[in-house]
Amino acid sequence: MPYDDLRSYLDALDQQGQLLHVEEQVDPEPDLGAAANAANRLGEQAPALYFDNVTGFEHPRIALNAHGSWANHAIAFDLPPNTSTRGQVEEFIRRWENFPAPVERRDDPPWAENSVSSSDVNLFDVLPLFRLNDGDGGFYLDKAAVVSRDPDDPENFDKQNVGTYRMEVKGTNRLGLQPVPMHDIALHLNAAEQRGEDLPVAVTLGNEPVISVVAGTPLGYEQSEYEMAGALRGSPEPITKAPLTGLDVPWGSEVVLEGVIEGRQREIEGPFGEFTGHYSGGRSMTVLRVDRISYRTSPVFESLYLGMPWTEVDYLIGPATCVPLYQQLRADFPEVQAVNAMYTHGLLAIVSTRKRYGGFARSVGLRTMTTPHGLGYCKMVIVVDEDVDPFNLPQVMWALSTKVNAASDLVNLPNMSVLELDPGSQPPGVTNKLVIDATTPVAPDDRGRYGQPVTDLPETGAWIDKLSSMIAERANENR
């Protein structure tokens, strides 16, 4: 059963033993960031965290690490918590085929219970703000869904974007927002500034879990995130109109901020501990003026810890990066078997493929870098044979160690685009990209001496099932 709001998702996590309620009183800094950081070090079954006793706040309700394990990610998609990583990606691909799914428009959203506007707007009155890392330049909203429309085609529902962008709190009604040039909101902002206008936006916090995933998914410009969320949920995404901007926003959000990104206004924003595992430094970024806040009574404030991988963001956007790349590559190269782009939001991607002819694998690698996501990410692409599972790193390391000759299997592409947050780019936003061909050469490529590969015995599959059952029976006996 899909979840229509964050609270029902947290209840489901609790019922599955995947929500840890921290009852003791803690300090907002460093305890909240440190606790979220620690949860990420507990492994692939780590729980979400819930705090309601935090020094300095009246009646805080703070959720952290909601997507921060494969078990939690599975529950978000109404799958068994023990679903494998590969199994979750495959189910993601299967549901993707249901796109576009219809939306469901609802009235009376729960976030309409309370509102303030104009001079009464004060973010600090509504949100229990805290820093995540000690080097952050301020308080950040980092798990919100930001909604904007194409100013040149505002009635086109498909060109309405729902994306996740970091936002630094700059004052009672001001946020600094980073619109990465490769993302749709940057296109919307550029169009608005060309017209000499501000860009209306709605920022929604505390959303149902699938829209949080879709907001970080690299869709096409005219692919609706709400219609994709419906496909992935297996049920129409409930949305409603925001009262000030008229933008379509999730029905079940905890808090909705409405306002504008002020045209041609920039201020220093940062530093921030980013998904790359490095602080990004201070940069001149856009300014978002908040003109209205709508919120549920005693809203749940959801935040996302980022830092040295793996953290919650890697679980949140891992499959959501793999699947669009897989779909886009398959459109041109049906030989592609699987894509693993879970590492640092796809700065590294591993692609398995069959080959039509010699040199084919390198063409697949180059195409990966020219997908909508690959243009700004996909700094390195490793291409492996179809019998190598890109999600099985020992197999990938085997392919790298036995199939690669540095003299001929590396394709170095100078002066390519990458997002500015990549700490290795020089200047920021420009880098060399690398394709590593770790496949077996096929005609007319006759390099190397590759004999008959060793494969699993025909009976291996049955024995895997038998031994797994024996292990499970022994575990039950020892309980």
Image: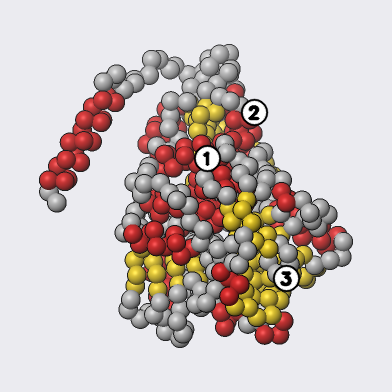
Q: Position of residue 306 (x, y in %)?
A: 49, 62
Front label number (1 vs 2)? 1
- Graded by Cα atoms within 10 Å as few (under 14), some (14 to 19) or many (20 or more), the crowding at tag 3 reads some
Q: Mark 3: which secondary structure?
A: loop
Which residue position holds label 2? 332
- Graded by Cα atoms within 10 Å as few (under 14), some (14 to 19) or many (20 or more), the crowding at tag 1 reads some
| Residue type beneath disc 2 | Asp
Residue visible at 12% across and 45% down in the picture: 477
Q: Position of residue 242 (x, y in %)?
A: 68, 66
| Residue type beneath disc 3 | Leu
Q: Is residue 50 left or right of residue 125?
A: left
Q: Position of residue 71 (x, y in %)?
A: 37, 51
Between disc 3 and disc 1, whose residue precedes? Answer: 1
Asked if disc 3 and disc 1 are in contact, CB closer than 8 Å, the reply is: no
Which residue position holds label 3? 244
Q: Residue furthest right?
A: 195
- Graded by Cα atoms within 10 Å as few (under 14), some (14 to 19) or many (20 or more), the crowding at tag 2 reads few
| Residue type beneath disc 1 | Arg
Disc 3 to disc 1, C-alpha distance: 34 Å
Asked if disc 1 and disc 2 are in contact, CB closer than 8 Å, the reply is: no
- Which residue is more in the foreground, 449 or 234? 234
Residue visible at 34% across and 72% down in the picture: 22
Q: Is residue 41 above or below residue 454?
A: below
Front label number (3 vs 2)? 3
- Which residue is more in the foreground, 256 or 387? 256
Q: Is residue 299 above or below residue 4?
A: below
Q: Is residue 331 above or below residue 108?
A: above
Between disc 3 and disc 2, whose residue precedes? Answer: 3
Which residue position holds label 1? 95
Disc 1 to disc 2, C-alpha distance: 20 Å
